[in-house]
């Protein structure tokens, strides 16, 4: 296979009709989500149509609930579709299992036109042929036995009920040139291609037939898929030519690699592995959809060498096929954390509070959006995921906290000195009618001077006493929100722990 990359511009002259066509054989992976995103951006940018088509003809691998997960994941990411199994459309049905008569009809058309043929070879014979080819160190392929059958014999055997498949009659001579929008012309010698099966013996189509027929009948203008389909790309072009159809614009995007840059991204990274690789798993882990979209968009595309922060309207305006990079892209999960922090900080505080409510409730902390609003400004700049908000500020909504007595001992201080600092802090706070941040901070800083302590030493003791943790939102604002009564309860409890750490 030879290619002449970079010679052809990406064609988008009118509203694009694009399809995202996943197989419901498992959870939607971030690789599939990226394909859907690029489809969606192209459709919205050109005021075209984003079509969902479910390719469910592989019934052995069908997973119950997988189709519903696809819809949930795309909706969470902010990609609404114009046509699909759940919303209908002018080219329904949109599940391939409901379109089998269409594929059979088109497969028979190819047989009648001489571009395909019935193959009656058994699996045992094919296994023997492959074994003999391997012994001769030849590439395994169909040997063409049934290709040589005359038409009458083939039809008679078929009508007699003999089990058969339909194979494409690939030209043996010449070359096939395919055009990829980002890779240019790709030419292969036809002699290197196989006679691929189009329709299986159970009457169900394989991808090569079903996807091409559907793309044509649904008037798809651009087919976006990963470079894994390049080996059979010439076959798909030949099928289009056999029917006499105009081809869509073909775009074979980069594959996603493991973070190490070695090997295709493995699904082992998800479901309890090193990293989540399913959009809904990312949702469960506290990532926001804006960040995931931003992150996915840059895995194989860039606007320029400076701009990295995007929200969906930006991407719709700036995306272009011409700037897709065909080189494999290593997945960088640190970048996801980075973008998630940026997008959390860009949210309006009311929006962030609303998104945090379910997180706190999942941690058995019954809170309302109103109760969270005064806290969000304290944590918004400090968290990278929504779950970190619970870890950092759950103490606001717990009746008591359980500080580690060892952590109540100030830096370079003894337990006795630390207890004395707590006692003086309790006396000081009891003198306040209500805790106001500005006056409280001045008073506590003055107390640190009186005790001959650094502010950090005193505040460190108070932080652990008040929150039960060493890392928390800003201490003074936290104390103001918690209020005098609760602060005194927690300081007194901390003092007791220092006096009797057992």
Image (cartoon, helix red, strand yellow):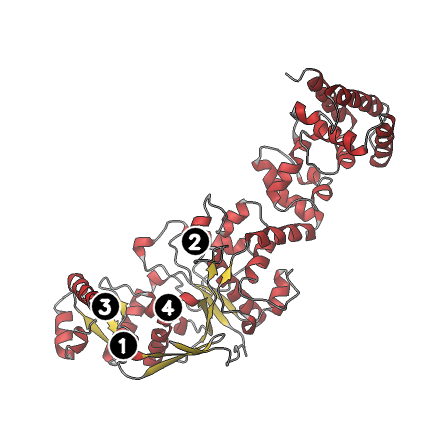
The label nearer to you, 1 versus 4, is: 4
Give the secondary structure at mark 3.
loop
The answer to whether marks 2 and 4 mark residues whose Cβ atoms lie closer than 8 Å is no
Give the secondary structure at mark 1.
helix
Q: Locate residue 94 relative to residue 430 in the image: left or right.
A: left
Q: Which residue is mark 1?
A: 109
Q: Locate residue 45 relative to residue 181 in the image: left or right.
A: right
Separation of residues labelled 3 and 4 (CA atoms): 33 Å
The label nearer to you, 3 versus 4, is: 3
Vertical side of 15 occupied by 24: above or below: above
Q: Which percent across, then down, holds residue 267?
A: 43, 51
Mark 2 or 4, nearer chain start: 4
Q: Which residue is mark 2?
A: 266
Q: Which percent across, then down, holds residue 31?
A: 47, 59
Residue 149 position by quadrant = bottom left
Q: Locate residue 183 relative to residue 100 in the image: left or right.
A: right
Mark 3 or 2, nearer chain start: 3
User: Which of 246 and 38 lies nearest the eye of the viewer?
Assistant: 38
- How busy is the neighbourhood of tag 1: few (under 14 within 10 Å), some, or many (20 plus)? some
Q: Which residue is mark 4?
A: 211
- How busy is the neighbourhood of tag 4: few (under 14 within 10 Å), some, or many (20 plus)? some
The label nearer to you, 1 versus 2, is: 2
Quadrant the C terminus occupies: top right
Give the secondary structure at mark 4.
helix
| Residue 137, numbered circle | 3
- Give the residue at the far front of this rendering: 412
Residue 400 in sight: no
Give the secondary structure at mark 2.
loop
Q: Locate residue 143 relative to residue 479 in the image: left or right.
A: left
Separation of residues labelled 3 and 1 (CA atoms): 36 Å
Vertical side of 311 occupied by 501: above or below: above
- How busy is the neighbourhood of tag 3: few (under 14 within 10 Å), some, or many (20 plus)? few
């Amino acid at each position: 296979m030879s290619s002449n990359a970079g010679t052809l511009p990406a064609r988008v002259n009118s509203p694009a009709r694009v399809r995202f066509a996943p197989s419901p054989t498992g959870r939607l992976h971030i690789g599939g989500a990226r394909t859907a995103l690029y489809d969606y951006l192209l459709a919205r940018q050109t005021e075209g149509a984003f079509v969902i088509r479910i390719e469910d003809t592989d019934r052995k691998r069908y997973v119950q609930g997988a189709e519903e997960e696809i819809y949930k994941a795309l909706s969470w990411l902010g990609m609404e579709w114009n046509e699909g199994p759940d919303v209908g459309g002018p080219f329904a049905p949109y599940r391939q299992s409901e379109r089998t008569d269409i594929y059979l009809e088109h497969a028979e058309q190819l047989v009648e036109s001489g571009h395909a043929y019935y193959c009656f070879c058994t699996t045992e014979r094919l296994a023997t042929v492959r074994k003999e080819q391997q012994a001769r160190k030849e590439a395994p392929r169909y040997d063409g036995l049934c290709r040589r059958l005359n038409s009458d014999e083939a039809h008679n055997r078929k009508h007699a009920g003999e089990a058969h498949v339909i194979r494409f009659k690939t030209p043996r001579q010449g070359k096939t040139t395919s055009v990829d929008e980002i890779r240019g012309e790709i030419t292969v010698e036809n002699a290197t291609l196989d006679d691929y099966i189009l329709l299986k013996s159970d009457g169900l189509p394989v991808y090569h037939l079903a996807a091409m027929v559907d793309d044509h009948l649904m008037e798809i203008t651009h087919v976006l898929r990963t470079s894994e389909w390049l080996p059979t790309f010439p076959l798909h072009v030949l099928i289009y030519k056999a029917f006499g159809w105009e081809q869509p614009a073909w775009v074979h995007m980069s594959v996603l690699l493991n973070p190490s840059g070695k090997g295709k991204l493995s699904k082992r990274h998800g479901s309890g592995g090193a990293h989540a690789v399913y959009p809904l798993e990312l949702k469960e882990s506290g990532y926001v959809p804006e960040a995931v979209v931003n992150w996915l968009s840059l895995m194989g595309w860039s606007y320029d060498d400076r701009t990295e922060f995007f929200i969906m309207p930006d991407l719709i305006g700036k995306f272009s096929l011409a700037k897709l990079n065909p080189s494999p892209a290593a997945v960088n999960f640190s970048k996801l954390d980075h973008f998630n922090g940026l997008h959390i900080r860009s949210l309006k505080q009311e929006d962030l509070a609303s998104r945090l409510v379910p997180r706190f409730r999942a941690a058995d902390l019954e809170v309302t959006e109103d109760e969270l609003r005064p806290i969000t400004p304290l944590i918004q700049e400090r968290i990278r995921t929504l779950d970190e908000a619970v870890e950092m500020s759950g103490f606001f909504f717990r009746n008591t906290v359980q500080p580690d007595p060892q952590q109540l001992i100030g830096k370079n201080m003894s337990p006795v000195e630390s207890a004395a600092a707590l006692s003086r802090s309790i006396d000081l706070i009891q003198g306040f009618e209500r805790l106001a941040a500005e006056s409280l901070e001045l008073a506590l800083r003055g107390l640190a001077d009186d005790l001959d302590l650094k502010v950090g030493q005193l505040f460190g003791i108070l932080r652990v006493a008040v929150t039960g943790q060493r890392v928390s939102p800003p201490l003074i604002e936290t104390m103001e929100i918690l209020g005098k009564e609760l602060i005194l309860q927690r300081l007194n409890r901390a003092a007791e722990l220092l006096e009797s750490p057992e």
